[in-house]
Image (cartoon, rainbow, N blue to C red):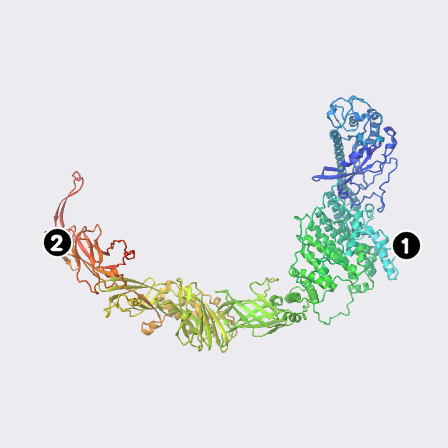
Amino acid sequence: MEQPSSSSKVTVEYFDPHGVYQLLSPGLLPRLPLRNLHWESHAGPLRSISSLHVDLIPSAQGSRPLSSTGTPASSNLNLSRVKSEDSAVSSDDGFRPQALGQAAVDKPEAGAEPGPKPIVKERRHQIPGLRQTPYLKVFFLRCDDNETYKTQARRQVREWIKEHTPPAQSTSKQSKQENHDAYEWVIVHVVVPNTSAATQPRTSGKGSEGGLTTEKATARWRGGGSTTILEKLGADFNSSSKSAPDRVAQIRIGVNDVPYEMLPRVVPAIPGSYTETPQDNENSWQDLISKLKSLILASFDMRVTQYEEDIREKDAQRTLPGWNFCTFFVLKEGLARGFESVGLVEDALVGYDELAVGLDTIIREQATTGPGPQHGGSFLPYTEDLKTQAQRAKAAILKDTCQEEISTEPDEPIDLQSSPEATDQDADEIPVNALKKRYRELILSNNISIFDFRCYIFARQLSLLLRLANAWSSQEELLAKIKEQRVSSLQGVAARLPPSQPSEEGEHLAVLAEICNRSMDFVVAIARILRDDIWASQSQTKQSAGAEDEKINSEAELDPIMVQVVDNIASSFTFSVAQQILAQTSTKALPIPPSTLAPPGAKIGLDGQEPKASIPEPKTMMHPARSSSLAIRSPPREPPSPGVFPRGRRSSVPEQGASSTFIKAGLEELAAHRAELYLLSRTVLEREGKERGWSAGWDEIPQICHKEEEMEDVDLSEEPTSETQKPETSSTVQPTLHGINNKLLRTALDNENDFYRLYETMTDKALRHYTVAGHTQSVSACMADLAVHKDNLKDYSAAASYFYRITASYGDDGWAEAELPMLVMYARCLKELQRKEEYVHIVLKLLSKAAASEKDRQKRKSSLRLGGHANFGSEEPISTTSYIHELLQITKSLGHEIQVPLENFFSRVEVDGTPRYHAGKDSFAIQLRFQYLLSDDLAVEKAKVRINALSGDTSREIWLETSGPSIFKKGDGTLLVQSNVIVPGPYTVSHVSLYTNNIALHYEHVTAPLTPFKGEVFFKCPKLLLYHRPEAFDVRLVASKHMHLDHNRSLELELAPGWNEVTSGVLHIRAATAGLRLQTAEVKVVDGSLELSKKSEAGVIRFGPLASGSTTKIRLPFNLEHEANDITLKLELSYTTDKGTFSFATTPSVSIILPLGVNVHDVFKHRALFSKFTISSATSSPLRLLSTTLEGSEVFEAQSGVTLTRPLMIFPRQPASMLYKITKRTPTTPLPRSSSHKDQKSTSLSLVLHYICLEEEIDDAITKSLQAAHQDTPLHQYSRLIIPTVITELRSRLSPYDFEKIAILSELSTSVLSNIRWRDRFLGLGHDEDEDQDIATMLSESLQTWQQNTPSISLMPIGIGKDTLVDHRSIIIPVGIPAVTVVHTADLKLAGITTVCSNTVIAVANQPISASLKIKWTRQWDEEHKPDDIQAQDLEFYYEVSGASDTWLIGGKRKGHFTVPKESGGGEIAQRLSFPVVLIPLREGTLPFPNVDIKPAPLARVNKPGDNNEDSSRGNITCETDYKNVGETIRVINDARKTTVSLDASGPQGGAMLLETEARGTMKRVGDGLITAE
């Protein structure tokens, strides 16, 4: 069923002279309201009307008895007014509409029946839109047969049409006024059963002009004439125009639908009578409904057209004199009401919005023109009702105070016995009501005030918005809801809606939200208008002349009684409007969470929870409530001191349960705007309570601003202002309830308890609505109000519960001004509850906020000094007296440490200068400057500062501490921290900590939050560069100068204690290179006197005393799993002196790559071995070879041809070669074959090389030059920082070409160090107080001066004496003699060859040469242990003489085997082997001798069954061949003097052919050779 409040309604008047409406209504009313109407606007798109209710009212003459109908007069039931279903309630604000001229309090009787009245033509009003006229007039006709139609019915219908024909259908000239009330008409023929008309079909078959054709209409009707009654009506009264509407319809009443007493007794017997089917009956009803819709829309269209035309005409006359806004308002409102009547509520709302804007425009124009004739019409200066209410309240106050009312006019008696309760309180509870007064009459008569005008417009807007929202708000329900809301608010329980019928369509929450939003704007504006209205009424009463208006107004405003009366009336009206809107926008679709407030006297259940209270806004069944999705996310529950909320109340966060999967459109907006209305009501309540001395808590917050009692300058000649006088005057009048008509507000202001209860209820409702809206900030604000209120009531447990949930987010949201007092109150609550842990955290937060406030105050003060704008806020510092002392007393007893950010108490921390070094000991200190913000002194037990490296190992850190306690006072303070640990390198301060009584104030530079103010820096730290002074303990890592490739490599550590008298020390060594293994157990002292601990410990070297100024070297062996060029160690040195224990750490690196490479080439001879050693540079840097020696062994001795007389420079691309002859010694006692491996080592020789790298020469030259330049200067203390920096830069800039140039010239040019920004390398050293200059700048200038004064540096000359060689590098390379089993000597001798000279052998080409191959052997180079089978048997070898195929043709025994007998006592075999060979040179020229290859023959062995296969393998037999003819050549010549060749192609060979040759001279062969004859 449709909701009455959401219906649209038009009036339809019916004329029922025959009393057939009661027969028709059972079929008509269920088909109402009309649905799906479509109206095409002239100025907009097509409008759709979903449902249109019809208000059927009888005509004034419809009850007259008509004897001509033939029906008894008793059958005509006089129904005064019949309405369609669900149309009983009007749409005006949910109340019944009011007829013009009817009092608002008069209500027509529902059962009154109008008596017979004469037909009187009603006079039309000159202003359209003031009457409710019908849109359609219906004539219900009963005509039983054609005869009756001819004699009576036609005449009756014609007379009715003549009387009621609308202007559009009449022939007379139509007027605009008539079009405003345009209507249409229609004739409905009601056919009663058992009549002749009932036997007629709808049409006779000739065609249907106004009826519907059926299947039975094809048969000719035989009774009484050729046409039916319906056709006659259509022919007589329908227009012949095709565009004219059909105005005739017919409805047949069934036999069962007519009462027995009304049913005709005689049934005419007509053959072939017509019988209507149910489908025909339904079609006839649909035809009637369609005609009703089209005719109603036609009349509506005519009205809208005329209204729009008139409105345009009136609006065009706005600037003309005499134009009246009130007349224009009534005209335009008529159009809006027309839209509203047909359900076009949006169009009607737009009209009222435009009228509201027009009213504001007129008021502004009249305000600017001043007194005199007002354009647009005049308004009443005040409202009579408000004036009467104010005078009555003032009289009541005077009566209570026993005073007389002087200003009351004698002709206006005031009933002092009356009270607001005597009036209609229902009207006061609903202040915004369009039916409260005859507003339209007042507007039309220009007798309305601005206050009433605005109230009426807003009431109409509210009515339309409620219809759009589909809200249910009848007057009775609204009053009941307000009464229950009032009672529940005071008792602390929730209100319930009266039972209502379920709606098919839910409320539109977005429209309800718009209502609340507009209401807020309306309340703000109307409150000011209300006050001006009342003051204007008082001024009008008292004024005597127009010129004294300003003076009278001023005096009226100073009247304390009227001030209170005006405040009370305005507060009551504002409060009532807010409560009305809250009641009207209440909906079951808002999922409001449970309340956090318990009703008075509520008992706590066994589970610690209070019984569930009802919710003021019940939830709808259509939209289930959400619980957790919209709840505010509170921090974790507070520590278990209270356990639960006070008195067992629950938190505002509902339990987890079934939640809605969607958010209905407008839900959050509605919840937010309703919450604003609750806060508005609370504001009114709070203001009234403040006048009575009742505070909700914020006015009672503790004064945390420390204000000293100081004298203030007072100007005695200055008159006191009205502001200072007004409180004194007002204080003489006691607060009163007179003028407050709202019952809820009066009850709440009756006593303090009710005031506090209503304040809590309003705040709690706003909180829950904001929770649904998702406004977390507003939820926090409401929760803060409850917390402050509970603290004011000394309910500390409840206040602490609220404070716990809100203080966590207040500071982050920028509410510092509200957070400070809440923290003070929270701390007081915790102190009263004896919750120390929480008290400590809250006090720390309070102190941090106080420090932040002080920081802001100082910033504003500094900006004011710099010319900024003055800030008139509080400039007094925040007082933290006794908080710090009490805090430290509590934290001292705690068992754990509390971490607090350092920036909470300090505004700035900076490192003052650079590190400061102590004289006579290896330590340094850093001074920090703090700016303390709090007024109480802070005692610090100790302070710690951490500095981190900026380069290299960035994880390296050094901790510095104070030597004793210190105290910080407000303002600037310094702190000195020191450390005995020095690790050279650039650093920055990354951590600062202050410790006092289990409180640690810390600051992390890396994770520090961004400062809230632009340009503000909390921590400042320059770059800190730590360095070693020349007198400090130093540890240097170098590679060992002397290297033996057969021994483990080692590193050398040079310890220089400097000025320290070391009593003991510990050196921790760790490898920083992968695969490096340090053998600390084998460490030994190689230079100096140092006692090492005998207790070996991996990676630790403990040593004894070291004298100051001494130097000690220790050697540390190492090995590598894989080769590496550089080795890095982590050295941590801790040493103890009489001044304390100090530490030093460094990470040195050293290159262990061999700077040189050695290759050897061996040549075996029968009795000697010649070895050539090639020495080259393995790096891009040259090196100097100082000496080379090949030391012999017990078996071999070596001889060198030439020795070095001066250093030899070896370049990377120019190696040096040394040749040595190695022979076997003649042993006195032969070594046995079973000698050990150690004895075999005695056969190895040692190549000893002494050298120096050019890079070392350059480093030594640079070091000595820089030391000499800074020796007697103040910069000498930075020498250990300068020299490594310069050497590093030099190495990075020298190219291989530069190294070669330096090696050749023995001179280094310092020009390579030009254009270097030396200052950047030394940043962080600070400022020299003596020179008043930056130290980095001084070092940069010093190096530039040194470079200018030293353009080149000569390398120091190096000698090769024994004393010199000891100081330089040396390497011993073991040289082993390769073991060869047999060394053969082969010699190819030519037989009978005569040589031209001693070195050249001449032979003839293509002539054989006889030769013999001589082979001998020796086994003296076979020094390795061979298997016994090899030593005890003969060795078989084979030889092969070979040459190039195009050079030699070799004949004879060119291949062969020979046997070397087994070794016998070490003596050589005396015999030699000789093999004949024939050599034939094939070409002329100088030819090399053929090659001779000798290889061991493979051993063939037959394995028999049972033989051991392990002995089947033969030992490795090696041999070398000393071929003496290597490098020798033979000169081959041709001996032919003449050659005859045939070139005939026809010969047998088909080409050239040698015929004859003649030798040169006489050749004679002698033996195997050729001899040339003379």
Q: Residue at x 86, y 40 (%)?
A: 112
Q: Are marks 2 and 1 in contact (CB under 8 Å)?
A: no
Image position of 242 with respect to 703: above or below: above
Which residue is the site of mark 2?
Answer: 1568
Residue 1365, percent from left and from top: 33, 72
Sequence-first tag of 2 and 1: 1
Which class describes the residues within 10 Å of circle 2: few (<14), some (14-19), or many (20+)? some
Residue 936, picture quadrant: bottom right
Residue 1128, picture quadrant: bottom left
Image position of 737 with respect to 97: above or below: below
Residue 1358, percent from left and from top: 34, 71
Could you tell me the amino acid type at mark 2?
Asp
Residue 547, percent from left and from top: 83, 57
Residue 845 versus residue 230: which sits nearer the camera? 845
Residue 392 versus residue 484: which sits nearer the camera? 484
Which residue is the site of mark 1?
Answer: 411
Residue 170, picture quadrant: top right
- Position of 1307 compared to 546: left or right? left
Residue occupying the far front of the picture: 1506
Alpha-carbon distance for marks 2 and 1?
A: 182 Å
Could you tell me the amino acid type at mark 1?
Asp
Q: Describe the element under mark 2 as helix, strand or loop.
A: loop
Residue 859, percent from left and from top: 64, 66
Q: Quadrant of the C terminus?
A: bottom left
- Position of 274 compared to 885: left or right? right
